[in-house]
Image (cartoon, grey):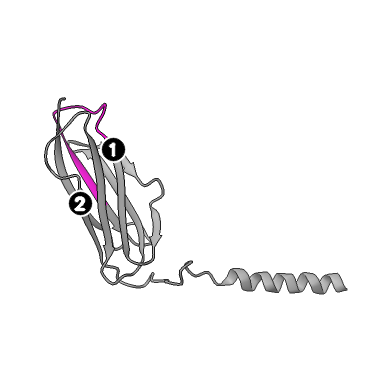
Amino acid sequence: MKNLWLVAFLLVGLSFVTSCKDDDDGNNNLDLELEYQVEIMSPDAVDKKVGDNIHLHVNFNERNANTIHHINVKIYQKDDATNIIYDKPVEAHIHQSNGVYEYHDDFSLNNIPPNENWILEAKAWAEEEGKNETMSTIEFHVSPQ
């Protein structure tokens, strides 16, 4: 009988622990109208050369300091959007609760076709893909070495 009561208490206690799930920061803003801003700081639209190293710097902000849930930074060929040469971060869900996130990375333009135009696309979105999505792009040309 003691074992039965112990099991019952454990089940009730476990249901309380798992029943309420908040964001880890308590900032559950799923119903808010998020206003993301995406600003590409680097690289610029100046022509690049095969073999150049470029620094990627993108500022992501939410105007009201609410959570930035997801980001993505991608580089793809202008004439063939399926030719993607950069697509990060691997895990798009960053959950930055203060509404400010700076993305930095370095990328080498090795082994890419010369004389092509490329698009750098940076975007942020809410919990659901496409919801409150904001995107910024720049275009640059890559010449032979």
Q: Judge by depth and name the residue closer to the eye, 67 or 106.
A: 106
**Residue 60 position within the rendered picture, expressed as x and y whole percent measured from the top left:** 28, 58
Query: Image quarter for residue 53?
Result: top left
Q: Residue at x 21, y 56 (%)?
A: 39
Q: Residue at x 19, y 42 (%)?
A: 119
- Within 10 Å of disc 1 (Cα), the crowding (few <14, some 14-19, many 20+) is few
Give the extent of the magenta segment. Answer: 108-122
**Residue 12 position within the rendered picture, expressed as x and y whole percent measured from the top left:** 69, 74
Element under disc 1: strand
Q: Judge by depth and name the residue closer to the eye, 109 or 16.
A: 109
Residue furthest right in the image: 1
Q: Residue at x 78, y 69 (%)?
A: 7
- The residue wearing badge 2 is 41
Q: How many marks?
A: 2
52 displayed left or right of 65: left
Element under disc 2: strand
Q: Earlier in the sequence, mark 2 or mark 1?
A: 2
- Spatial separation of the CA atoms under disc 2 and disc 1: 15 Å
Question: Does 113 appear in magenta?
Answer: yes
Q: Quadrant of the C terminus?
A: top left
- The residue wearing badge 1 is 107
**Residue 47 position within the rendered picture, expressed as x and y whole percent measured from the top left:** 12, 36
Discs 2, 1 touching: Cβ within 8 Å: no
Residue type marked 1:
Phe
Residue type marked 2:
Met
